[in-house]
Amino acid sequence: MIKSLSKSAEKVQSVLNQYGLELTVIEFSESTRTSQEAADAIGCELGQIAKSLIFKGKETQKPVCVIASGVNRVNEKKIREYVGEKIEKADAAFVLEHTGFAIGGVPPIGHITEVKTILDEDLFKYLEIWAAAGTPHAVFKLTPDALLRITRGEVVLIK
């Protein structure tokens, strides 16, 4: 683990502190960019990784953050039912523009624009989960209920 946080990870820690929960960003020297890399670095199950995937509405071009369990693929047709329009995976420039973070480190909170958030109900199978914290090396541990509280997301079946 790295002792001092990078600028992006510090930004996430600052946002987390505003919620009054004891959530701490941890940075690793090894990559946590993919769900598998994060699970390996942390030493947890792949399903405990809460990956933040950014999509955009095909018509509105509005961002949608789907926070999925690391073991699940997102069924875009299913998500369309919840957002009311077809969605497509956002490119790196769109993700950075709307979240302020690069792909591989997008946290579930602290985005620079308002982002509709959908939570994978499978995350609620676990007592604790891990989410990205602003860089491809930073994560934080929380409960699914805490994730719901800080994101004010909608819990749905995503697969």
Image: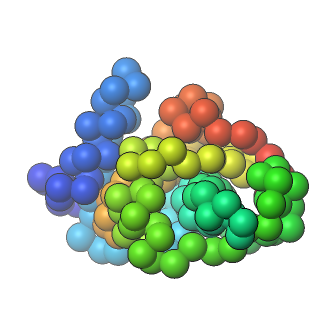
Task: Name, please, the residue furthest toward the bottom.
Answer: 91
Q: Residue at x 51, y 33 (%)?
A: 150
Which quarter of the rendering shows the N terminus?
bottom left
Rendering coords of residue 74 (x, y %): 74, 67
Report the number of discs: 0
Q: Residue at x 57, y 29 (%)?
A: 149
Q: Who is closer to the viewer here, 54 or 105?
A: 54
Rendering coords of residue 152 (x, y %): 60, 33
Q: Is residue 114 visible?
A: yes
Answer with the quarter of the image where residue 80 lies: bottom right
Q: Who is closer to the viewer here, 5 or 94?
A: 94
Task: Name, please, the residue furthest toward the left.
Answer: 4
Q: Who is closer to the viewer here, 69 or 46?
A: 69
Task: Name, please, the residue furthest toward the top.
Answer: 20
Task: Name, please, the residue furthest toward the front.
Answer: 59
Apparent side of residue 107 relative to residue 46 in the rendered image (left or right):
left
Which quarter of the rendering shows the C terminus?
bottom right
Apparent side of residue 82 relative to residue 146 in the rendered image (left or right):
right
Q: Residue at x 28, y 41 (%)?
A: 13
Chosen colour scheme: rainbow
Looking at the image, residue 5 lies above or below residue 109: below
Answer with the quarter of the image where residue 93 lies: bottom left
Rendering coords of residue 75 (x, y %): 81, 68
Q: Is residue 45 visible?
A: no
Looking at the image, residue 57 lies above or below residue 18: below
Rendering coords of residue 112 (x, y %): 38, 49
Answer with the quarter of the image where residue 71 lies: bottom right
Looking at the image, residue 96 lies above or below residue 15: below
